[in-house]
Amino acid sequence: MPELPEVEVTRIGLADRLHGARVRSVHVGKPLRWPLGVAPRTLHDLAIGPLSRRGKYIWMPLQGTKRSGGLLWHLGMSGSLALHERDAPPRGVHDHFELISTAGVLRLTDPRRFGAVLWSDALDVPPALRLLGSLGAEPFDAGFTAQALHTACRSRRTSIKAALLAGDIVVGAGNIYACEALFEAGIDPRVRSDRVSRPRADRLAAAVRATLARAVALGGSTLRDFRDAHGAAGEFQLEARVYGRAGEQCVRCDGTVRRIVQGGRATFFCPGCQRR
Ligand SMILES: [Zn+2]
């Protein structure tokens, strides 16, 4: 499943190439998770602004003389975006949305169709507001501080791993990244959120940021072409220090990486380095 770093790599790969292009037409294929919300022809001739990201959503501002707003893109469980600058291959059976622009054909390929492309007049009105309003802080924004993380954790009794995965404190700490960040911070994933001390919250906030930044950098540095964004996740997995390494020796101590299940998800950690 595309996580925040893969979505960010996708955004970075597309932003400059699409900025300033104009929409020529739109092709809507089989239904995605949510309908587009406007007649496709009303998008014709709108100019594409700078792409931004909120959580796992990419926002594409669209500006015209009669209408302005934008499209919110989500890759769902299995989606990927590719921009074909010339000679786009024929549409495949899983290509369910296509934005034909003066910069090329932007195509959403999504076999499971949990992805979505939907119109919103702005980010702070529905439907964008409904989807983005309850998201936690952006890990790379100044608003995500150790203080904010600590305060949010104090009102929860779930494990710290579950608190990270919930996405309403900070976005982006999906299963792999939550495991890795907790390892970096030296915190046992089973620790109750309200027992995480302020110094540990400091380390955890820094670890979440660093882990996600590293994943974005690996995606960006190993892949010139955003179409391989899923390969970036694979690259990060190869470099993961605990995730997927059950039974192997810890990279930091003589201990062995353990695998447990929390809330139905696999957790990997080192009982030697990560303390209760
Ligand atoms: Zn260890």
Image (tube, helix red, strand yellow):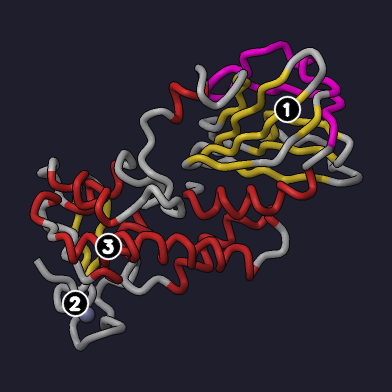
Residue 103 placement, left or right of 67: right
Q: Residue furthest bottom?
A: 254
Q: Secondary structure at mark 2?
A: loop
Q: Which residues are magenta?
A: 21-45
Number of on-image labels: 3
Q: Secondary structure at mark 1?
A: strand
| Precedes in sequence: disc 3 or disc 1 | 1
Residue 123 placement, left or right of 15: left
Q: Amino acid at mark 2?
A: Cys
Q: Which residue is mark 2?
A: 273
Mark 1–mark 2 distance (CA, rounded to whole Å): 49 Å
Residue drawn at (77%, 45%), measured in percent from left and top?
83
Q: Position of residue 252 (x, y in %)?
A: 27, 84
| Precedes in sequence: disc 1 or disc 2 | 1
**Label drawn at residue 179:** none
Question: Would you call the spot at circle 1 few (<14 residues within 10 Å), some (14-19), or many (20 or more)?
Answer: many
Question: Would you call the spot at circle 2 few (<14 residues within 10 Å), some (14-19), or many (20 or more)?
Answer: many
Residue drawn at (51%, 54%), measured in percent from left and top?
5
Q: Position of residue 124 (x, y in %)?
A: 51, 24
Question: Would you call the spot at circle 3 few (<14 residues within 10 Å), some (14-19), or many (20 or more)?
Answer: many
| Precedes in sequence: disc 2 or disc 3 | 3
Q: Which image quarter is the C terminus in?
A: bottom left
Residue drawn at (51%, 60%), measured in percent from left and top?
233
Q: Which residue is mark 1?
A: 62
Q: Is residue 160 above or below residue 24?
A: below
Q: Which residue is mark 3?
A: 204
Within 8 Å of ligand 1, the CB of disc 2?
yes
Within 8 Å of ligand 1, the CB of disc 3?
no
Q: Amino acid at mark 1?
A: Leu
Q: Quadrant of ligand 1?
A: bottom left
- Per the picture, the main secondary structure of the magenta-coloured stretch is loop
State which quadrant residue 101 falls in: top right
